[in-house]
Amino acid sequence: MKLKSAFISVCVLAVLSVSVGMLSGWAGPVGGSSVKGTVKFEGTAPKPARIDMSQDPLCAKAHPTPATTEEVVVGTDGGLANVVVYVSEGLATHDFQPPQQPAVLEQKGCQYKPHVLALQANQKLDVVNSDETTHNIHPSPNNNREWNMTQPHGMPLEQTFAREEIAIPVKCNVHPWMKGYIAVFKHPFFAVTDKNGGFELKDLPPGTYTITAWQEKLGTQTQKVTVGASEVKTVDFSFKQ
C-alpha cells in the first residue's frame, strides 16, 4: 500500500507541475518546429542614393568611399535585406519573457547598424555611439513612450519598449540622413532578413500561423502556414516596386 500511495503522489505532483507550467506561460521550445525562407526583390533593383555627410566632417571622414542609403538593399542573387518577418496571428496567449541578452543598436559611420532592428517588448536595448561625433537618437513611436536623447561618444545608453509596435522610425536630430527602424514584438517569433534575404523563425509550437513580411518602402505581405511537431516549413516572399 505504501508503494502504491507513493506512486500516486508522484503522478499527482507531475500533473500539477505540468498544469503550473501551462498557466505560467510558454516554457521554451515545443516540438522544435520552424518556418524559414527567403525574401526576394522582383525586377531591377533600385540604385541606392549617395549620402552627403559634408555637414559633419567627422562623419565624412569615416567613409573613404561615399555612404549610401539603405531603404531598399538587394543582394547579388535578388535577396532583399532588412525585411522584418514575424508571426502575426495564430499564437495562443502566453507570457513570453524577454531575453536576458540586450539588443544592440550601434551608431557607426553616422549610420544605424543594423538599419532595421527587431527585439522583444521589455528587452533591454543598448544604444552605442562608436563615432567621434555626438549623436541624438530619437525614436518616434505610436504605441510606446517617445524619447529623444543626446549621446556623446562612449556614453552608455539603455532603453526599453513596453508594447508591441511594427515598426518605429528612428532618426538623429543632429544628422538628418540618419534613419532606421525598430520593430518590437510581444513574442520571440520574429527575424530580420540577412543580406541574402534569408530568415528563420525557430522553436514554434505546432499550429497554423499567419506569417507577415514588412519592408519600409515596399509594404507588407502575409502568408498562412501550418507546422507540425518538429516540422520545418518553407515560406518565401517576393516584393516589387
Image: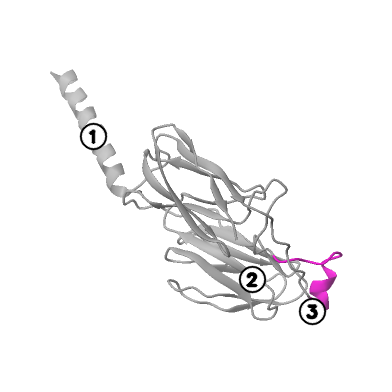
- Which residue is at a point 77% across and 69% down the rendered structure image? 50
Residue at left offset 31%, top offset 43%: 21
Residue 63 magenta-highlighted: yes
Percent of width and height locating residue 56: 79, 79
Image marks 1 and 3: residues in contact by CB distance under 8 Å: no
- Mark closer to the chain start, 1 or 3: 1
Residue beneath the point at 73% across and 70% down: 110
Q: Secondary structure at mark 1?
A: helix
What is the three-letter code of the residue carrying label 2? Lys
> Relative to 175, is 200 above or below?
above
Residue 177, compared with residue 217, is above or below; it is below
Q: Give neighbour class at mark 3: few <14, some 14-19, many 20+ (Cα, 10 Å).
A: few
> Would you say the residues marked 2 and 1 are in contact, meaning their CB atoms lie under 8 Å apart?
no
Q: Which residue is mark 3?
A: 56
Q: Residues within 10 Å of mark 2 (few under 14, many from 20)?
A: many
Front disc: 1 or 3: 3
Q: Which residues are magenta?
A: 53-69
> Which amino acid type is marked by label 3?
Asp
Of 73 and 104, nearer the camera is 73
* Dot 2 or dot 1, earlier in sequence: 1
On the picture, is 52 further left or further right than 11?
Answer: right
* Residue that label 1 marks: 15
